[in-house]
Amino acid sequence: MALVVGLVPVAMDRMREGAQYRDVVRTVVGQLRSAREQAVASGRDVQFTVDVAQRRYGLGTEPSLVLPDTLQMKAVAAALEGDEPSTGKLSIRFLPSGGSSGGSIQILRGAGDGVRLRVDWLSGRVSQEALLP
């Protein structure tokens, strides 16, 4: 019985970490797609920004969503005006034409596995691929 009681917290931590990971992936994909839709509908550029050093991400130039401590985020994008690549702050810009500046975002778990989200520069479409440790 003591063994079962000892394993419950470990199992609960893993379930919580898995739920956080899935929630972050869903949120980032949703915001990237929303940015594209907003750019097309409004006729204005819309940015999705990742600030790796501050562990923040989101729409606009000042990201407001916080990355959980159990996850890591990496981003690759063309440097845009207002970006600070040396500090880890990068943006993917979505254009009214439906295209984008392009880039990729990796969301990684502690074990090193995760997902890479790619934003196509021509179409602005978001795709994802699994990353193995």
Image (tube, rainbow, N blue to C red):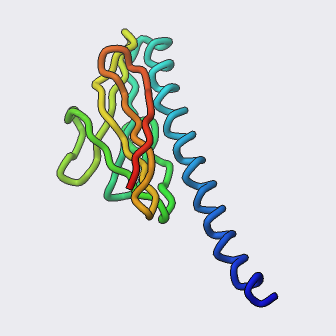
The one of 59 and 9 positioned closer to us in this rendering: 9
Location of residue 32 in the rendering, given as x and y in whole percent from the top left corner: 46, 31
Q: Residue at x 59, y 55 (%)?
A: 20
Q: Residue at x 30, y 27 (%)?
A: 102
Quarter of the image where one finds residue 18: bottom right
The one of 61 and 100 positioned closer to us in this rendering: 100
Location of residue 89 in the rendering, given as x and y in whole percent from the top left corner: 28, 47
**Most extreme residue toward the bottom, as rendered?**
2
Location of residue 53 in the rendering, given as x and y in whole percent from the top left corner: 31, 58
Q: Is residue 118 above or below residue 68?
A: above
Q: Residue at x 70, y 85 (%)?
A: 6
Quarter of the image where one finds residue 39: top left
Query: How many labels were placed on the picture?
Result: 0
- State left or right for residue 13 relative to residue 93: right
Location of residue 99 in the rendering, given as x and y in whole percent from the top left corner: 35, 15
Q: Is residue 19 above or below residue 129?
A: below
The one of 9 and 63 positioned closer to us in this rendering: 9
Q: Is residue 1 above or below residue 109?
A: below
- State left or right for residue 29 relative to residue 85: right
Q: Quadrant of the C terminus?
A: bottom left
**Most extreme residue toward the right, as rendered?**
1
- State left or right for residue 132 relative to residue 66: left
Q: Residue at x 45, y 12 (%)?
A: 40
Q: Quadrant of the N terminus?
A: bottom right
